[in-house]
C-alpha cells in the first residue's frame, strides 16, 4: 500500500479529500501500456486521494489504475484540475458581471437619447467593466 504525503499549502492548493474539477484532459501519454488506463475527463468532478512526494501530481478516489510491473499507479498533474468551489464562483462572477454590463448598456442607450455628460460617464463605466471582465476571464486580474 502506498503512503501519501500530507501536503502543505505551499506545495499544492489542494488537500486530501478536496473536490476538484478536471479542466484539461489532454494527457501526454508516451508509454503504450499506460494508454489504456483510466484518465480524468474534462468537466467531471473528482476527489483527491493522495499526492506524490513532490506535490506536483495526485491520485483520485474515482480513478484507480493497476500499477505496471515495478512501478506505482499513475499520477495526474495538479495543473489539470481546479478547485470545484473556485470554478463555480468564477462562473457566477462572470454571469453577474455580464448582467452588470447589460444594465450599463441599457442606461447608456437612455443617456444617449437625453444627451449631456451622463452618456459619456456611463459609456466610460461600461468600457471599464468590459476591460475588467476580459482580464478576469483570462485570469489576469
Image: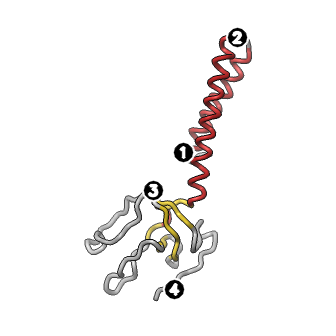
Give whichever of discs 1 and 4 has the lower sequence position: 4
Front disc: 4 or 3: 3
Q: What is the secondary structure assignment of the residue under circle 3? A: loop
Label 4 Cα crowd, 10 Å radius (few <14 / some 14-19 / many 20+) = few
Who's the residue at 46% across and 89% down the image?
Answer: 1
| Along the viewing direction, whichever of 103 and 58 lies nearer the viewer | 103
Residue pointed to by mark 1: 138
Residue 128 sits in quarter: top right
Residue pointed to by mark 3: 43
Give whichever of discs 2 and 4 has the lower sequence position: 4
Residue 32 sits in quarter: bottom left
Say which quadrant the C terminus sits in.
top right
Front disc: 3 or 1: 3
Residue pointed to by mark 4: 3
Who's the residue at 63% across and 74% down the image?
Answer: 8
Q: Position of residue 7 (x, y in %)?
A: 59, 75
Give whichever of discs 3 and 1 has the lower sequence position: 3
Q: What is the secondary structure assignment of the residue under circle 1? A: loop
Front disc: 2 or 1: 2
Q: What is the secondary structure assignment of the residue under circle 4? A: loop
What is the residue that sits farthest to the right in this orientation?
117
Query: Where 98 falls versus 6 (above or below)?
Result: above
Q: Position of residue 59 (x, y in %)?
A: 47, 74
Task: Give how far apart the Cα atoms at labels 4 and 3 are.
Answer: 29 Å
Task: Give how far apart the Cα atoms at labels 2 and 1 are.
Answer: 35 Å
Label 3 Cα crowd, 10 Å radius (few <14 / some 14-19 / many 20+) = few
Task: Give how far apart the Cα atoms at labels 1 and 4 are.
Answer: 37 Å
Front disc: 1 or 4: 4
Amino acid at each position: 500500500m502506498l503512503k501519501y504525503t500530507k501536503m502543505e499549502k505551499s506545495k499544492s492548493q489542494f488537500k486530501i479529500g478536496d473536490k476538484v474539477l478536471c479542466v484539461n484532459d489532454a494527457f501526454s501519454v508516451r508509454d503504450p501500456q499506460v494508454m489504456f488506463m483510466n484518465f480524468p475527463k474534462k468537466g467531471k468532478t473528482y476527489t483527491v486521494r493522495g499526492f506524490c512526494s513532490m506535490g506536483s501530481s495526485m491520485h483520485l478516489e474515482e480513478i484507480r489504475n493497476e500499477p505496471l510491473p515495478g512501478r506505482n499507479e499513475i499520477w495526474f498533474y495538479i495543473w489539470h484540475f481546479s478547485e470545484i468551489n473556485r470554478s463555480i464562483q468564477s462562473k457566477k462572477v462572470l454571469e453577474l458581471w455580464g448582467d452588470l454590463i447589460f444594465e450599463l448598456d441599457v442606461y447608456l442607450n437612455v443617456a444617449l437619447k437625453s444627451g449631456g455628460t451622463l452618456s459619456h460617464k456611463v459609456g466610460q463605466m461600461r468600457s471599464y467593466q468590459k476591460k475588467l471582465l476580459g482580464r478576469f476571464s483570462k485570469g489576469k486580474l
